[in-house]
């Protein structure tokens, strides 16, 4: 599964680095390193959304750092 | 440096500087659309058929400078084709030129195994639908009348990632592209470029974030004997970076970790490759995935230094600066923790400086964080030399055979041999650029042009040992593996 997190400046200021760090830890803790590929992406121009732009297998989501764990369980673990 | 892209470089750098200037002033959004008109005032076209095409090319270059795809189509590749700038070079590969005398010998026709050559009124003719591009006719012709026309971009691509669409516009096969950037400076029309992180970094500096620059070991010598690491630190601080650290220190860190890894593998009889060159790593991942187990798990010098910086100050944003394009793709691999947040080329960071009227100024070299071995990491054979030095310092009595691959073509050959179990060495040092990082696509000077200045600068460094340097700087505690 390909998970792409925007690392552009707008998403950075909304907390993309916190999300990346938490995702890396969640992937390791759940033992799904072989199944989940974490990628960074240049700005895709969706900065108007409230959260950080995160794409899971091509579907765009807007994610806030505080919702990361719930998102991981639902959209990533739940779809594996 | 004599290149075929001096004019293009000027245009590229002018665009980068203008974009940087607007970004520093926070005016990019309001002034973006004026840029093509400002840079191509007209009414006469300078390089292309008309000013409208020239302006469209500028518009697409601005998009790239902002980190967007030149066309509206979104793709993750760092290396991108500027569609409007591609001149649709001829695709017919072997063509008969005026030199043909339609001679009696007809060696061309006799040498062709595919019946592709016939004689028209004045000269030989090659039927493109039958020609298999073997080149035998060109070799056979006593008048050298058959020319091999190959697109410069396609010719330099080491992994055959360049194709064309139905209109003859260059297309990059992103599954094959290893982001080495060889094609970028090969195109005489400047139609291939890379996305940049320049605007993101400027915005983060403007927002008051702590951004630390990490300058590549290949840097020393690139800007003459007077531009020292201290010069870089001063200039980078002037434009808002909080600090600068040389990635040569990361070279020391990587060498020490890799030496431990190699020593173990050597005793087990397991063959391994280096993992510091991102284009070489991409080549293994995309073209030789069966060899992933043989790739060193040690992180690159860039990642090592980034981890060191972030350990001391977790909120810091780390930015790599060097002659490398593939490093941008390494920063996008988020499976590696603590790696550099962004990577810039020399051209991009100098555009950021020029936009603020800052230049690199001569300065006495008062700064050194790396051993001479770490500083030489950016030269072909430099990784091996540093690892061998570490063996000695560790008291390991091993003398492994290392195949030092100079450039992507040699890397590919060595990996093929490893794949079939016929590698005549214990280890592969993979450097996707000829000469090592100093020959990187975004170098300022060619390896030989910079050599004297580089030798002078590195010759002036003290002769500290690798392991003692790491201990002294507290760099020996950093976790040095991918996972």
Image (cartoon, grey):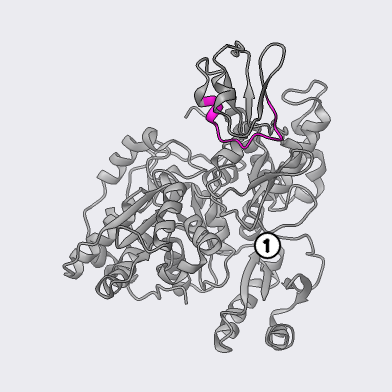
Q: How many labels sit on residues?
A: 1
Position of B60 relative to B127 (above/below):
below
Task: Give the residue at x 81% y 28%.
Answer: B51
Q: Quadrant of residue B312?
A: bottom left
Mark 1, chain letter?
Answer: A
Residue A3, can we see it?
yes
Position of B175 relative to A37 (above/below):
above
Are there few (<14), some (14-19), or many (20+) residues within 10 Å of tag 1?
many
Q: Position of residue B335 (x, y in %)?
A: 55, 73
Position of A77 relative to B220 (above/below):
below
Q: Position of residue B306 (x, y in %)?
A: 47, 66
Q: Nearer the viewer, residue B140 or B449?
A: B140
Q: Position of residue A69 (x, y in %)?
A: 67, 87
Residue B297, can we see it?
no
Task: Give the residue at x 51% y 58%.
Answer: B283
Residue, disc 1: A9
Position of B79 relative to B274 (above/below):
above
Image position of B464 (left or right of B231): left
Task: Give the residue at x 70% y 32%.
Answer: B128
Magenta-highlighted stretch: main secondary structure?
loop
Image position of B457 (left or right of B108): left
Q: Is residue B136 magenta?
A: yes
Q: Quadrant of residue B18?
A: top right
User: Which range of residues does the magenta coloring cover?
Assistant: B126-138
Image position of B353 (left or right of B376): right
Q: Position of residue A15 (x, y in %)?
A: 67, 73
Q: Quadrant of residue B399?
A: bottom left
| Secondary structure category for the residue under label 1 | helix
């Amino acid at each position: 599964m390909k998970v792409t997190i925007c690392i552009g400046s707008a998403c950075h200021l909304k907390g993309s680095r916190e999300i990346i760090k938490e995702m890396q830890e969640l992937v390791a803790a759940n033992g799904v390193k072989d199944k989940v590929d974490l990628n960074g992406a240049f700005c895709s121009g969706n900065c108007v959304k409230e959260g950080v732009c995160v794409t899971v297998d091509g579907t765009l989501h807007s994610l806030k750092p505080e919702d990361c764990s719930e998102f991981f369980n639902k959209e990533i673990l739940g779809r594996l | 440096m004599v290149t075929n892209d001096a004019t293009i470089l000027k245009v590229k750098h002018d665009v980068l500087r203008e974009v940087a200037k607007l970004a520093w002033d926070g005016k990019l959004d309001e002034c973006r659309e004026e840029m093509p008109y400002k840079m191509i005032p007209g009414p006469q076209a300078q390089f292309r058929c008309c000013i409208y095409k020239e302006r469209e090319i500028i518009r697409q270059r601005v998009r790239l400078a902002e980190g967007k795809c030149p066309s509206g189509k979104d793709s993750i590749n760092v290396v991108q084709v500027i569609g409007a700038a591609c001149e649709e070079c001829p695709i017919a590969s072997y063509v008969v030129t005026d030199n043909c005398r339609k001679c009696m010998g007809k060696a061309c026709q006799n040498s062709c195994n595919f019946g592709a050559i016939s004689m028209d009124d004045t000269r030989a003719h090659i039927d493109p639908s039958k020609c298999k591009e073997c080149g035998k006719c060109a070799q056979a012709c006593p008048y050298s009348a058959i020319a091999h026309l190959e697109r410069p971009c396609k010719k330099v691509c080491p992994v055959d990632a360049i194709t064309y669409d139905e209109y003859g516009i260059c297309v990059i096969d992103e599954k094959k592209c290893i982001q080495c950037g060889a094609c970028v400076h090969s195109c005489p029309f400047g139609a291939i470029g890379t996305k940049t992180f320049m605007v993101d970094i400027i915005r983060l500096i403007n927002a008051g974030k702590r951004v630390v620059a990490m300058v590549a070991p290949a840097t020393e010598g690139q800007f003459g004997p007077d531009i020292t690491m201290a010069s870089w630190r001063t200039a980078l601080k002037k434009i808002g970076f909080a600090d600068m650290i040389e990635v040569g220190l990361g070279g020391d860190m990587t060498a020490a970790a890799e030496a431990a890894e190699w020593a173990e593998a050597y005793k087990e009889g397991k063959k391994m490759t280096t993992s510091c060159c991102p284009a070489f790593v991409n080549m293994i991942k995309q073209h030789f995935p069966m060899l992933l187990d043989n790739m060193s798990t040690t992180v690159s010098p860039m990642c090592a230094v980034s981890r060191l910086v972030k350990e001391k100050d977790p909120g810091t944003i780390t930015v790599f600066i060097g002659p490398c394009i593939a490093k941008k793709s390494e920063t996008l691999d988020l499976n590696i923790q603590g790696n550099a947040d962004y990577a810039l080329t020399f051209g991009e960071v100098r555009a950021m400086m020029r936009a603020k009227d800052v230049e690199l100024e001569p300065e006495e070299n008062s700064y050194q964080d790396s051993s001479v071995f770490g500083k030489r990491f950016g030269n072909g054979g430099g990784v091996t030399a540093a690892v061998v030095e570490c063996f000695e310092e560790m008291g390991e009595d091993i003398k492994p055979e290392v195949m030092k691959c100079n450039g992507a073509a040699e890397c590919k050959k060595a990996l093929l041999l490893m794949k079939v179990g016929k590698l005549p060495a214990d280890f592969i040092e993979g450097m996707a650029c000829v000469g090592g990082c100093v020959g990187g696509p975004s170098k300022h000077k060619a390896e030989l042009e910079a050599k004297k200045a580089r030798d002078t600068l590195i010759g002036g460094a003290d002769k500290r040992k690798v392991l003692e340097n790491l201990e002294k700087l507290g760099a020996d505690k950093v976790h040095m593996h991918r996972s």
